[in-house]
């Protein structure tokens, strides 16, 4: 198998934190993905996509406990 972006054969399965953005919030979902070691492109199988979509729904419904792990700050420098 080769990366669909850079065509590198250096791909490995690993656990990743996939970001889900809802409004100003970012939620991280821990899933398995194939990840290119050259460019970082990720691809997900059906099970991982189901977990991501289920998590998105539960985050929107606020039906899953979450833990704050950091803060994001924004500034505009002229």
Image: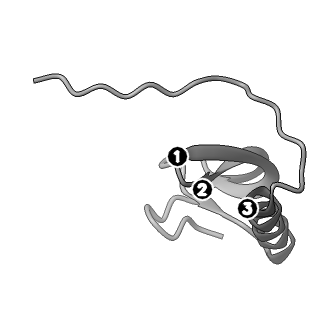
Determine which of the numbered discs, if any, sits on residue 9 in the image. Answer: none
- Name of the residue lying farthest toward the bottom: 46
Identify the residue at image location x=73%, y=61%.
60
Q: What is the distance, in whole Å, between disc 1 and disc 2 at their CAs?
A: 6 Å
| Position of residue 67 in the picture relative to residue 40 (left or right) | right
Residue denoted by label 2: 22
Q: Position of residue 56 (x, y in %)?
A: 74, 63
Q: 6 or 23: nearer the eye?
A: 23
Q: Position of residue 10 (x, y in %)?
A: 61, 52
Determine which of the numbered discs, if any, sits on residue 60 in the image. Answer: 3
| Position of residue 25 in the picture relative to residue 49 (left or right) | left
Q: Position of residue 48 (x, y in %)?
A: 81, 66
Determine whether the residue tagged by mark 1 lies in a helix, strand or loop. loop
* Mark 3 closeness class: few <14, some 14–19, many ≥20 residues within 10 Å: few
Q: Do the residues under discs 2 and 3 have CB atoms within 8 angstroms?
A: yes
Identify the residue at image location x=84%, y=65%.
51
Image height check: is 8 above or below 2? above
Q: 31 or 4: nearer the eye?
A: 31
């Amino acid at each position: 198998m080769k990366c669909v972006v850079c065509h590198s054969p250096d791909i490995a399965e690993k656990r990743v934190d996939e970001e889900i953005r809802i409004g100003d919030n970012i939620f991280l979902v821990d899933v398995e993905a194939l990840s290119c070691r050259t460019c970082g492109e990720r691809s997900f199988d059906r099970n991982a996509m189901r977990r991501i979509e289920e998590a998105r729904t539960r985050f929107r419904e606020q039906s899953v406990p979450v833990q704050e792990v950091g803060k994001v700050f924004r500034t505009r420098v002229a």
